Image: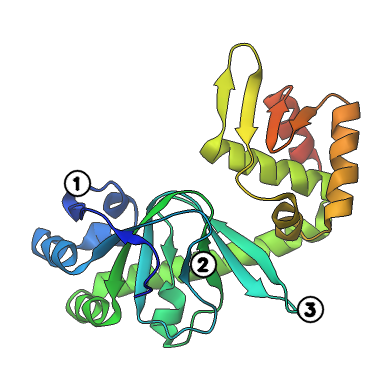
């Protein structure tokens, strides 16, 4: 496991809501106790790398809470943000099942607590519980379908719609409502990362933001954005595909 991050108290899998929502829901109490005893919980501060692209996949990570950005080297040698992963997301499971190195680097973008389980323990669990393997296969298929859907959506939607969709997705996880302001989001990533995430450049993002402000759809102050009407934005996104 990476040396970054710092150890934190281990949370029992029986007390963690993540196991009820993911593949671990099929594990018995004894198997959950095995996982609790074997896993390692760590806290990563913003900017710390959980694993690097090309590293040997020696296990899997689960996000207890926080935000992780998955980055990949682009043709120009820059690390481009390709995916955001939130609470409950499993990292590295496809590489582990395929016995391949990590395809992306994973970096904490907010204070993030993760659970780590080694390849050997996971293999023992898969050998002893066939339903667990079936659920990981279904997850892999769903993730591939989502990737394909996102690609089609990107082809059909313009930059404006993709930006609004990305911002509302972030609002769902990290936004809040203030009586005197409205719907507020502290954008947890830099503008260049936001641009990479939706497949454009920072200059285009800046132009799009200026148009949104001119139309009073949203107000941007540094990394903070205030939405004038969430329902109106959602309706615009639906109308574009």
Please count the marks in the image.
Answer: 3
Q: Quadrant of residue 25?
A: bottom left
Badge 1: few (under 14), some or many (20 or more) residues near its Cα, within 10 Å? few
Q: Position of residue 115 (x, y in %)?
A: 31, 61
Which residue is painted at 18% across and 69% down in the image? Answer: 38
Against 123, residue 192 (above or below) is above
Q: Residue furthest left?
A: 30
Q: Position of residue 165 (x, y in %)?
A: 70, 44
The secondary structure type at the circle numbered 2 is strand
Against 59, residue 8 (above or below) is above
Residue 234 visible: yes
Which residue is painted at 69% across and 67% down in the image? Answer: 80
Q: Quadrant of residue 154?
A: bottom right
Q: Position of residue 215 (x, y in %)?
A: 89, 26
Label 2, label 1: how far apart the Cα atoms are: 26 Å
Query: 230 or 68, which lies in front?
Result: 68
First in sequence: mark 3 or mark 2?
3
Please name the residue that numbered disc 2 is placed on.
106
Please name the residue that numbered disc 1 is placed on.
15
Q: Which mark is residue 76?
A: 3
Label 3, label 2: how far apart the Cα atoms are: 19 Å
């Amino acid at each position: 496991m990476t040396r970054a991050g710092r150890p934190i108290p281990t949370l029992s899998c029986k007390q963690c809501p993540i196991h009820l929502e993911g593949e671990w829901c099929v594990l018995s109490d004894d198997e959950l106790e095995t996982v609790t005893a074997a896993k390692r919980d760590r806290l990563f501060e913003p900017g710390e790398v959980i694993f690097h692209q090309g590293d040997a996949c020696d296990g899997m990570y689960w996000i207890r809470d926080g935000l992780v950005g998955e980055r990949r080297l682009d043709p120009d040698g820059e690390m481009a943000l390709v995916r955001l992963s939130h609470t409950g997301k499993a990292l590295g499971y496809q590489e582990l099942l395929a016995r391949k190195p990590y395809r992306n680097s994973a970096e904490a973008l907010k204070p993030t607590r993760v659970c780590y389980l080694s390849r050997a323990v996971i293999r023992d669990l898969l050998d002893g519980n066939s339903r667990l393997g079936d659920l990981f296969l279904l997850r892999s298929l769903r993730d591939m379908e989502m990737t394909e859907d996102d690609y089609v959506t990107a082809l059909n939607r313009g930059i404006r719609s993709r930006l609004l969709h990305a911002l509302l997705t972030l609002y769902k996880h990290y936004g809040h409502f203030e009586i005197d302001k409205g719907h507020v989001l502290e954008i947890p990533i830099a503008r260049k990362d936001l641009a990479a995430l939706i497949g454009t450049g920072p200059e285009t993002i800046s132009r799009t933001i200026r148009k949104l402000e001119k139309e009073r759809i949203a107000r941007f102050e540094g990394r903070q954005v205030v939405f004038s009407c969430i329902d109106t934005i959602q309706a615009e996104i639906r109308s574009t595909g």
